[in-house]
Amino acid sequence: MPDAVAPMPEGWCLYLLECRNGTYYAGITNRLEARYAAHVAGTGAKYTRANPPLRVLASRGYPDRSAASRAEAQLKRLPRAKKLAFFESADVDVDVGAT
C-alpha cells in the first residue's frame, strides 16, 4: 500500500480518503494536511460532511493543478477495486487530449 500522506513538493496533489460509510472520496489540493483537516471538521466537500473521512488512503504529487485535475478525472472513472492500484503505479497514464 502507498504512503498515506507522503510529503508533497511544491505543487498539487491528488488524494484518496476512506469515509466512515466505507466509500472512497477523491480530491485535489495544494495543501493536503489543511484540506484533510477541513474534511474532518465538516467544512470540506459536501460529500465528506455527510460521510466524514476516517483516513487518507493515498496521495500523489503533480506539478500543477491541471495535471492533478486530469489525474483526478481518470481516478474517478476507475472501479473501486482499482483505485488504490492507481497510486501504486509509477507510470499513471493520464489522457491529455483523448476524445
Image: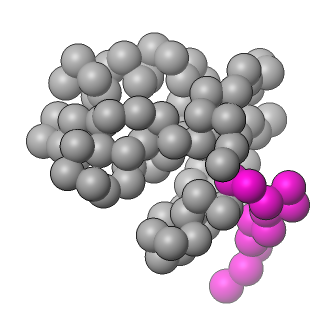
Can the viewer see residue 45? Answer: no
Q: Residue at x 55, y 63 (%)?
A: 83
Q: Residue at x 66, y 63 (%)?
A: 85
Magenta segment boundaries in residue numbering: 87-99
Q: Is residue 90 above or below residue 5?
A: below
Q: Residue at x 38, y 45 (%)?
A: 18
Residue 14 occupies quadrant: top right
| Residue 58 located within the stretch drawn in magenta | no
Q: Position of residue 13 (x, y in %)?
A: 64, 35
Looking at the figure, which quarter contains the C terminus?
bottom right
Left or right of residue 4: residue 54: left
Q: Position of residue 25 (x, y in %)?
A: 38, 49
| Residue 90 located within the stretch drawn in magenta | yes
Left or right of residue 74: residue 51: left
| In the foreground, 57 or 8 | 57
Q: Position of residue 31 (x, y in %)?
A: 56, 19
Q: Is residue 85 above or below residue 42?
A: below
Left or right of residue 5: residue 95: right
Q: Residue at x 75, y 39 (%)?
A: 62
Give the main secondary structure, helix, strand or loop, of the magenta stretch.
Answer: loop
Can the viewer see residue 91? Answer: yes
Going by the picture, which residue comes out furthest to the front? 1
| In the foreground, 21 or 99 | 21
Going by the picture, which residue comes out furthest to the bottom? 99
Going by the picture, which residue comes out furthest to the left? 50
Residue 34 occupies quadrant: top left
- What's the colour scheme? one colour
